[in-house]
Amino acid sequence: MAVYNGETYLDKAIISILQQSYEDFDFLIIDDASTDKTNEILRSYSDPRITVVRNETNFGLTKSLNIGLKLAKGQYIARQDCDDISYKLRLERQVQFLELNPEVILVGAQSRIIDSDGKPIRSRAEEKETSKLSVIWQLMFDSPFIHSTVMFRKDIVHEKYGGYDEQFRTSQDFVLWSKLSKENTLLNLNEILLDFRTHEKSVSSNYSVENLNRTAPIYIDNIVDVTGDRHSAADFVNVWLGAKRSSQFSIPLQKKILLTSMIDNIYEKFVAKYPEAVHDKAVNKSVARKYLYCALYYISYSRFESIKAFYKAVSFDKNILAKEMTQYLIRVLMGASGLSVLKTIRKFTSFL
């Protein structure tokens, strides 16, 4: 655990680790030269499993994590941020899984998103990928893991791959997963084992345009590994990141509407390289979520294109009909005239 000025949530994060059902661990906490009461809080704990290391100057998260990796003596490394809360069975479940599955080098878990007061925002952050192929698929679009949920094998991640890339002050986890996935199996347990806190000071809330521009080449490389087409990959990443961060990027309308066809092309190349992906339920769910995102994104641009994207999502995951259709149709039809409502419903039912 690395922490910088984390006094607000630090106690709850530490207690969640000390109360784990699996008790045989060392707890390394790297205080990155905090100026608040963080150090005072850390020194108040007398549990012999805790080791506190204080940086003389503020190095940033990535370097602090690598300091922890170098000092860690265990076979497995578990990560958690200083504002998140691990469930009691988290370490036990992940250690058991890695012991039983030696081919897997990293395992994450599902998480529940909570707000600054600890109240659930929704039941899951987003379903995270539970198969090797779905992780490879997701890495072309976003991170397949909540960083605070992962446990990995130190000998491979640190000693073979050198840990986190210190060129990246943020998104260092995404960069590492991208590197590891090319030769190894990474996946998530299909079990919620952590509360992931989101607030204005959390790392995930502070992604800038500069950071996105720095990570864009990683996304492009991940796509090129699958499609072999760097030009199309660069074009897609520009549009996809623009859609995900619409307030920070200016993307022409004609490019926005091409998003679904771009995903079509990537999926076609993906199953050509990994034919078994067609029958991988985790892949199908992840593909469906990309089309669902397009369907919601298109609502303000073209209801017809939005409905087509929604139909594609359903074709990959029928559960979307039950889970999303009512809210989706409400959003599509909001503000529409009576005639356009009728036309929209007719178009929608014609696809179904």
Image (tube, helix red, strand yellow):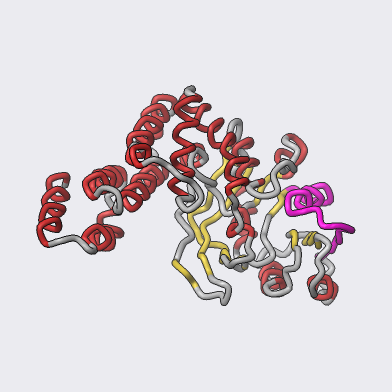
Residue lying farthest right?
Answer: 56
Q: Position of residue 291 (x, y in %)?
A: 34, 45
Q: Residue at x 81, y 53 (%)?
A: 59
Towards the viewer: 104 or 292: 292
Magenta region: 50-75
Quarter of the image holding residue 196? bottom right
Q: Residue at x 40, y 27 (%)?
A: 269
Q: Position of residue 80 (x, y in %)?
A: 67, 59
Towards the viewer: 305 or 174: 305
Q: Give left or right: position of 78 versus 71.
A: left
Quarter of the image holding residue 336? bottom left
Reply yes or no: does residue 136 show up in magenta: no
Q: Give left or right: position of 93 versus 236.
A: right
Q: Residue at x 35, y 51 (%)?
A: 297
Q: Quadrant location of the N terminus?
A: bottom right
Q: Residue at x 76, y 54 (%)?
A: 60
On screen, 233 above or below 110?
above
Quarter of the image holding residue 255? top left
Q: How many marks?
A: 0
Q: Give left or right: position of 73 versus 77.
A: right
Towards the viewer: 275 or 124: 124
| Residue 58 seen anywhere in this rendered image of the structure | yes
Q: Give left or right: position of 229 versus 185.
A: left
Q: Position of residue 203 (x, y in %)?
A: 64, 58
Q: Position of residue 145 (x, y in %)?
A: 56, 50
| Residue 100 seen anywhere in this rendered image of the structure | no
Reply yes or no: does residue 67 show up in magenta: yes
